[in-house]
Amino acid sequence: MSNLFYTLPQAELASRLCEKSFADRVFFANSGAEANEAAIKLARRYFQKKGEKNRFRIITMLQSFHGRTMATLTATGQDKVKEGFYPLLEGFSYVPFNDLKALEDQLDDTVCAVMLEPVQGEGGIVPADAGYLKAVRELCTKKGILLIFDEIQCGMGRCGKLFAHQLYDIFPDIMTLAKALGNGLPIGAMLATREAASGFDVGSHATTFGGTPLATAAALEVLHIMAPRLSWMRSAKRADTSKKNWRN
Ligand SMILES: Cc1ncc(COP(=O)(O)O)c(C=O)c1O
């Protein structure tokens, strides 16, 4: 059954992910690369739908990793991933991570999105500086540019909160998840605010196996187990790790 139809586990997982994050809408895919493809497509379509056809550039970070499809390897800030696959997609520029000035210099009215991992994974486990991430959020808001966080590696509890950016007290417009979301079953997700998600209309994007009942049921169980344990990490007072409560 394709994701043209809703299923209960899919709807419940989307709703739980929104409850626990900044997001209002979720698109399910089969992998991290596909979740990032969806994010890249959404950012471009958001502005093209508004008639801003020249606003298609995406700024990513050097040493980043976003996947191995043509768009996501283009977004990746590491030459070794691109070797042998030229020509790449148009409209991607790269700046050093944690360098605000370098980013600011790129942010003209051709930029639709800034895409980064709050903690770079393949780049060597490099966290964003707290001040940097806040300043990037402010810059994007000021210039009306979408901010995409790739939390495929650093999200789902890996950094101590459910999502790594929650350590920084700021929110993206779009976030991607995969890996630990399914904990062994293939699933990816792109989460977005209602505003950013308005870039897609019915039929703009889809994938046959995105959000199958099996994968979403598994991810729901992952959230049931993981989320309360992370609440315990946030606040000792809220600690209750009895098995019964994992399901609440
Ligand atoms: C930060 C990040 N983004 C995207 C991906 C790609 O995910 P997948 O291998 O599920 O396509 C990875 C995989 O290592 C990753 O670490």
Image (cartoon, rainbow, N blue to C red):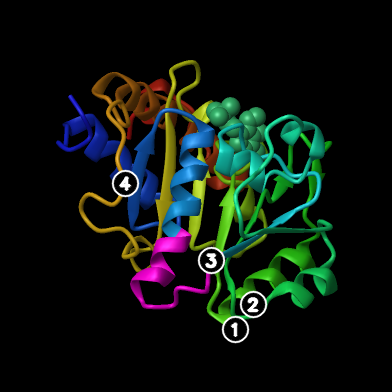
- At x 52% / y 72%, what residue is drawn? 55
Where residue 194 sits, quadrant-wise, is bottom left
Up the image or down, 74 lies above or below 110; here it is above
Residues marked 2 and 1 touching at CB (< 8 Å)? yes
Residues marked 4 and 2 touching at CB (< 8 Å)? no
Label 3, on which residue? 56
Q: Could you tell me how far apart the alpha carbons at marks 3 and 1 are, in whole angstroms?
A: 18 Å
Q: Which mark is residue 142?
A: 1
Magenta region: 43-56
Quadrant containing the N terminus is top left
Up the image or down, 119 lies above or below 6; here it is below
Numbered label tally: 4
Precedes in sequence: disc 3 or disc 1: 3
Label 4, on which residue? 205
Tell me the amino acid under the disc marked 2. Glu
Where residue 16 sits, quadrant-wise, is top left
* Residue 134 percent across, percent down from the top left: 69, 69
Q: Nearer the viewer, residue 132 or 65?
A: 65
* Residue 176 percent across, percent down from the top left: 51, 45
Query: Residue farthest to the top?
Result: 184
Residues marked 3 and 1 touching at CB (< 8 Å)? no
